[in-house]
Amino acid sequence: MRHFYDRHFQTVYRFVICRVGNYPEAEEIVSDVFYQAFRDHAQYDAEHAPEAWLLGIARHRVLDVLRKRSHRPRILHLDEELPPGTFDLESAELPDLLLQREELAERIEWVLSGMSPDDEKLLRWRYLDEKPVKEIARSLGINEKAAEARLFRARSAFRDAFKHAAREFDPTSSEVTHER
């Protein structure tokens, strides 16, 4: 095992550090990669190079770390200037703004859940998962023009339903029904 680790460590480490750019994080990921490789060695296919298998594990671990990193809020130091476009907390009506955002999110979810499953899936893929039209088309087994046409129809249906939702949706009510 030690020989396996020594032989492949540099390749895996270079792969990881080039992607995360942070030595402690890279070291932790590399440790996880080799731990998983030793734990799951029975799944290794001897027809393939061990480095390819290790780099596949490393790629998944790096993606996990980068996803988590993108969801972390950026912490400002007290002496740092606020980024442009940041509102002044003292003059902002923060509770009202948050409440409006929550109500909007609830209304969007409510409208989406009342749409046809196909339209809901298309809109979630495009706007919540931010999938490109090309990827959506590939997932559906259709060409891009057909995917764009379906998205157009789904957006139109959403727009109409959203207009009607203002009358039907009451976020303070515990019962929400779809009557369309």
Image: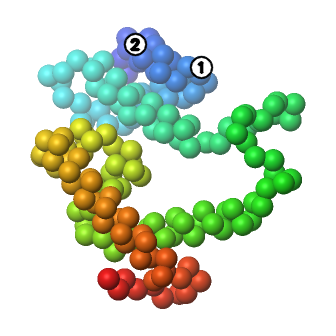
Q: Callout 2: helix, strand or loop?
A: helix
Nearest to N terminus: mark 1 or mark 2: 2
Q: Position of residue 46 (x, y in %)?
A: 18, 24
What secondary structure is found at the residue carrying circle 1?
Answer: helix
Where does the N terminus fall, quadrant-wise? top left
127 with respect to 104 (left or right): left
Quadrant of the drawing holding the C terminus: bottom left
Tag 1 residue: 23
Q: Percent from the top left, x then y, of residue 146? A: 15, 47
Q: Residue at x 24, y 38 (%)?
A: 134
Q: Which residue is mark 2?
A: 11
Q: Residue at x 51, y 18 (%)?
A: 17
Q: Is residue 121 at least partly visible in the picture?
A: no
Residue 110's place in the image compared with 21, above or below, is: below
Which x, y percent locates residue 121? 29, 59
Q: Nearer the viewer, residue 166 or 133?
A: 166
Label 1, label 2: how far apart the Cα atoms are: 15 Å
Residue type of the residue flagged with mark 2: Thr
Q: Is residue 138 above or below residue 109?
A: above
| Res 123 → quadrant | bottom left
